[in-house]
Image (cartoon, rainbow, N blue to C red):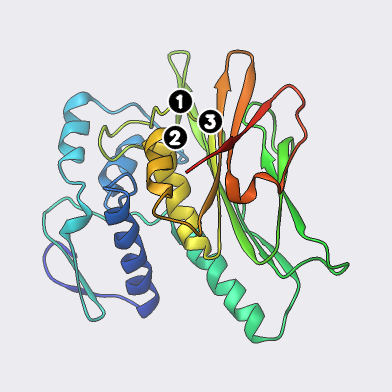
């Protein structure tokens, strides 16, 4: 309905849209909440995923532009027919932030929130040591970690090719779609983990960094001193893990076949 008239939304939805637009601007559209037409075409994660026709994708890509979201008070308007908003790349992080705020307001000083791919560590463990958050091995079943990062009062969000996908014609199509191409992002990365204070930021940036690729992500990180990241990519028969300087000493490798490198901003 928002393409016909401004639609009233909850204050939470408005706030979430504002954060999403902020990161869409900062990432030059690598993260874009108006990807809904593309997401709907692919249907990845649904019952009937499919490879869209080129003409369908071209039309859908033309509808993706975060600048077409117009917020006025608690109402939202979309400029063009066919446009839609998909907050799947940031909503879970926002939910984690709300849960964190709720627990803190009730005096909780030590907790671990796990929303699947989005983890928030409140304080430290009862024994005063940091929480150890595993980084999934993209090539193995859930629960097999490449390594772990030790954190206190931080959000740890991972986006990877292994989370949701379907296979067709002998090829895997994952759910992290590029707003520019309309197809699953091809950046050479298998997963991206972002460590941040606010989980919504980590959620949006893990998606954006995956779409942008490590070179462009590293460039953007120069302007984000409070954000740390772990990039995982395949290098011949092993994984290459690149960890930003701020958390390099807090990352512990478990997969001894992999190689870890310090990533300078």
Q: Residue at x 34, y 42 (%)?
A: 39
Mark 1 neighbour class, 10 Å CA radius: few under 14, some 14 to 19, many 20 or more: some
Residue placed farthest to the bottom in the image? 106
Residue 214 x %, y %: 44, 34
Residue placed farthest to the right in the image? 127
Circle 3 residue: 190
Label whose residue precedes the other's in the sequence (3 or 2):
3
- Quarter holding the N terminus is bottom left
Query: Mark 1 to mark 2: distance in Å?
Result: 8 Å
Query: Mark 3 to mark 2: distance in Å?
Result: 11 Å
Residue 54 sits in which quadrant? top left
Q: Residue at x 22, y 32 (%)?
A: 57
Q: Secondary structure at mark 1?
A: loop
Residue 98 sits in which quadrant? bottom right
Q: Secondary structure at mark 3?
A: loop
* 256 left or right, relative to 167: right
Give yes or no for contact between labels 1 and 2 (Cβ–Cβ under 8 Å).
yes
Q: Nearer the viewer, mark 3 or mark 2?
A: 2
Mark 2 neighbour class, 10 Å CA radius: few under 14, some 14 to 19, many 20 or more: many
Is the residue 150 above or below the residue 209 in the image? below
Residue 26 x %, y %: 31, 54
Residue 248 x %, y %: 65, 44
Residue 52 x %, y %: 28, 28
Mark 3 neighbour class, 10 Å CA radius: few under 14, some 14 to 19, many 20 or more: many
* Disc ID at residue 214: 2
Is the residue 14 above or below the residue 137 in the image? below
Circle 1 residue: 188
Q: Residue at x 16, y 50 (%)?
A: 82
Q: Residue at x 28, y 40 (%)?
A: 179
């Amino acid at each position: 309905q928002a393409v016909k008239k401004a639609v009233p939304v909850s204050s939470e939805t408005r706030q979430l849209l504002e954060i999403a637009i902020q990161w869409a601007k900062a990432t030059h559209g690598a993260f874009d909440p108006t990807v809904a037409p593309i997401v709907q075409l692919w249907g990845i994660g649904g019952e009937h995923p499919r490879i869209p026709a080129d003409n369908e994708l071209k039309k859908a890509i033309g509808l993706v532009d975060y600048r077409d979201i117009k917020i006025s008070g608690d109402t939202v308007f979309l400029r063009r027919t066919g446009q839609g908003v998909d907050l799947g790349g940031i909503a879970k992080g926002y939910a984690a932030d709300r849960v964190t705020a709720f627990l803190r307001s009730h005096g909780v000083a030590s907790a671990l929130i796990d929303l699947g791919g989005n983890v928030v560590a409140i304080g430290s463990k009862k024994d005063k040591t940091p929480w150890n958050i595993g980084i999934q091995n993209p090539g193995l079943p859930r629960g097999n970690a490449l390594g772990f990062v030790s954190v206190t009062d931080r959000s740890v969000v991972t986006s990877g090719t292994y989370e949701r996908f379907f296979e067709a014609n002998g090829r895997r199509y994952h759910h992290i779609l590029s707003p520019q191409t309309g197809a699953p992002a091809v950046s050479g990365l298998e997963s991206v983990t972002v460590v941040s204070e606010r989980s919504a930021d980590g959620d949006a940036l893990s998606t954006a960094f995956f779409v942008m690729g490590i070179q462009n992500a590293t460039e953007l990180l120069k302007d984000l001193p409070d954000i740390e990241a772990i990039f995982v990519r395949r290098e011949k028969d092993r994984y290459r893990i690149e960890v930003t300087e701020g958390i390099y000493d807090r990352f512990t490798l478990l997969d001894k076949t992999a190689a870890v490198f310090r990533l300078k901003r």
